[in-house]
Amino acid sequence: MTHATFVLVHGAWHGGWCWDAVAERLRAQGHACVAPTLRGLAHRRGALTPELDADDHVDDVASLVEALDLRQIVLVLHSYAGLLGPALQARLGPRIVHRCFIEAVIPTPGQCMLDLVAPAAARRFERAAHEHGDGWRLPPPDPAQFHLGGAIAADEVARRLTPHPWRSFTAPLRAPQADVLAHAGSYLLASDRDPQPYAGFAARADAAGWPVTRMAGGHLLMLTQPAALADYLLSLPTPH
């Protein structure tokens, strides 16, 4: 891979902090790397409001890319961040050379995050938001659901998770969107989750001609397998 700029976007309840070990390895190989924290989360939790939605998160990532004039981007989206992919493609398309979805949703226009998760998970999220988040915050889940496998202490992860804006799960994106699967990309799936909630999205990526790779380490591969994940990202095919 020629020197690229990696833009690493975290999932729900997390922050840019979750990419630290991966970003360190990418920078050590001479690549630029940014890992924005989405509004309302982690150190930006003071910005959490009932109105905050996924369009705000699209703007967080796109505005940073535009302000820094980043190009030759490998856009890496984890979990919830996949929801932002079509809108980021529409806004930043010429700047992106590769798209990598890691255990991430792949939406179609008009879908919100709740449309993309299993019905049981959607009901669980809705109950948590209304019973423990005043109807507009989604409390962090038990880290056990991420299948950390003892590679990292669950209580350490739990300590760093913060509530997520509920509206970003319930309101479809308003921003223009483009078909990310019509462009060069890759999909990474955890091989040790059963059932595997992202298998359907991996199948869509495979049908579009994207290579699908499997890696053991549960949902938070950037925490459980930072070296292997960095090596995987460094191996992605990008134009020279």
Image (cartoon, helix red, strand yellow):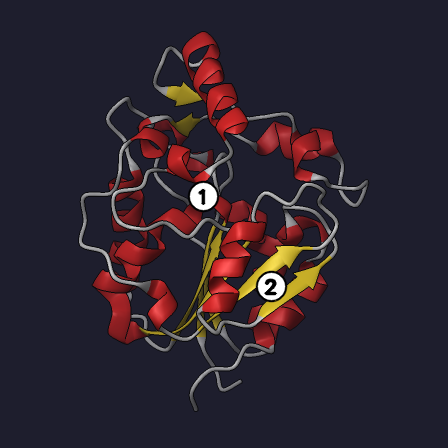
Question: 61 or 101: nearer the eye?
Answer: 101
- Residue that appears at 51% across and 39% down: 14
Q: Mark 2: which secondary structure?
A: helix
Q: In the picture shown, does residue 2 fall above or below 206?
A: below
Per the rendering, the mark at residue 80 is 1
Residue 103 visible to the viewer: no
Q: In the picture shown, does residue 211 fall above or below 191?
A: below
Per the rendering, the mark at residue 99 is none
Q: In the picture shown, does residue 235 fall above or below 217?
A: below
Quarter of image, res 138: top left
- Whole-percent x and y of residue 25? 63, 67
- Is residue 197 found left or right of 216 in the rendered image? left
Question: 213 or 233: nearer the eye?
Answer: 213
Of badges 2 and 1, nearer the viewer stands 1
- Residue that appears at 30% across and 63% down: 179
* Quarter of the figure that contains the C terminus: bottom left
Crowding at mark 1 (Cα within 10 Å: few <14, some 14-19, many 20+) = many
Question: 158 or 202: nearer the eye?
Answer: 202
Quarter of image, res 62: bottom left
Per the rendering, the mark at residue 24 is 2
Residue type (three-letter) at the residue carrying disc 2: Glu
Crowding at mark 2 (Cα within 10 Å: few <14, some 14-19, many 20+) = some
Q: Contact (CB < 8 A) between labels 2 and 1? A: no
Residue type (three-letter) at the residue carrying disc 1: Tyr
- Whole-percent x and y of residue 77? 46, 56
- Whole-percent x and y of residue 86? 30, 57
Residue 12 visible to the viewer: yes
| C-alpha span from label 2 to label 1 | 23 Å
- Is residue 179 found left or right of 204 in the rendered image? left
As drawn, the residue found furthest toward the bottom would be: 240
- Whole-percent x and y of residue 159? 62, 28
